[in-house]
Image (spheres, rainbow, N blue to C red):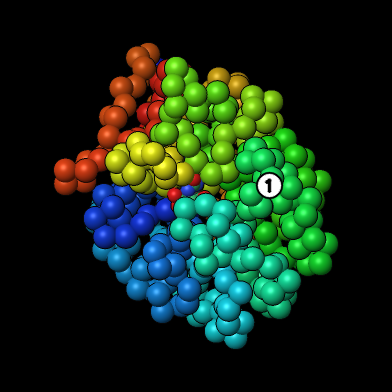
Amino acid sequence: MEEIEIIKPDDWHVHFRDNEILKAVVPETTRHFARSIVMPNLVPPILNAKQAIEYKKRIEKAIPTTDNFEPLMTIYLTEETNKKKLKQAFKDEAVFAVKLYPAGATTNSDSGVKDIQKVMPVLEMMTEIGMPLLIHGEVTDKEIDIFDREKVFIDDKLNFICKELPDLKITLEHITTTEATQYVKEGNKNLAASITPHHLALNRNALFVGGIRPHNYCLPILKREMHRKALVEAATSGNPKFFLGTDTAPHLTKDKESACGCAGVFNATYCLSILAQLFDNENSLNNLENFISRNGAKHYNLKTNNETVLMIKSNETSIFREFLHIGNQKIKIFKPDFPVFWTISK
Ligand code: NCD
Ligand code: ZN
């Protein structure tokens, strides 16, 4: 048996949804994480401080009393976002960050931004007050191949924002390509990126193993093996610009296994065990704590957590539960195609 004790991790990108799904998925995150940035893409989206505060209360109600957890709330940026009110919401600590979804890029993003120029005054104000911008980095043009949408976003949109506002604190979320790792490494000091467990574990072949695999469908879509390798290199390198954002995104199996299945992978339950195994397989366990517990906090100017967690490697592979049950519905829990020997205890 092998054990490592590390600073309690944070998840810098989660989808908790609402109502019954929220109640079921919140404990899957709060069990092991101290803090999470909560995505605002509800239907309708979280557009202002009042909605964020109410949503935070619903989340807090779902946290088991045994867990110490802080949800950090976000607002969904639209071309109508009010600059003054947003500034106040940040000063009041009701809202931690702003999320930019290009309109139509992903699940529930219809009211997202069509024209970056229109939100530049808001981004300028955010730069002044030090409010982080979280970006879903994909263009939405139908003519652009789905596998190229991240790269084109970087070239056409992100590069513009970074040049105009070099001091804006930006997280390019759930990156999936060599180009993204490169751009972030060489980019502004305030530019960092989050990486998901599933993009570290899978390449695009996983979408089509013996047939179509809707549970591996997420956005940005899985890419070629060379890109997965670049992500693994970035995550395991210890480089402070890369940190964990699981993008755990629950959808009922009936909505995934459909003629038009939803994008999103629900990975909260076993993500830390999977990451420990991934880092172990790369002989990089020494950098696991940087990736899951230190780098994100540093990027967001927060303290690292005081508590620690114990990770234990057993001689037997873990048996993962396949589903999270919600009444008579269920959500598929992500598991990789390699054996996992690591478990987490408190
Ligand atoms: C997310 C969701 O389901 O809300 N889906 C996904 O594939 N990642 C939205 C998102 O983060 O893109
Ligand atoms: Zn997401």
Q: Say if 248 sits above or below 102 in the image.
A: above
The percent coordinates of residue 279 (x first, y second) are 56, 27
Q: Specify whether 307 is left or right of 183.
A: left
The percent coordinates of residue 162 (x first, y second) are 78, 60
Q: Say if 83 sits above or below 47 in the image.
A: below
Q: Mark 1 points at which residue?
A: 143
Q: Specify whether 92 is left or right of 190.
A: left
How many badges with numbers are in the image?
1
Q: Quadrant of residue 273?
A: top left
The percent coordinates of residue 41 (x first, y second) are 45, 61
Q: Can residue 165 be seen in this view?
A: yes
Q: Can residue 3 be seen in this view?
A: no
Residue found 48% across the figure and 73% down from its top: 47
Quadrant containing the C terminus in the rendered view: top left
Q: Specify whether 128 is left or right of 59.
A: right
Quadrant containing the N terminus in the rendered view: top left
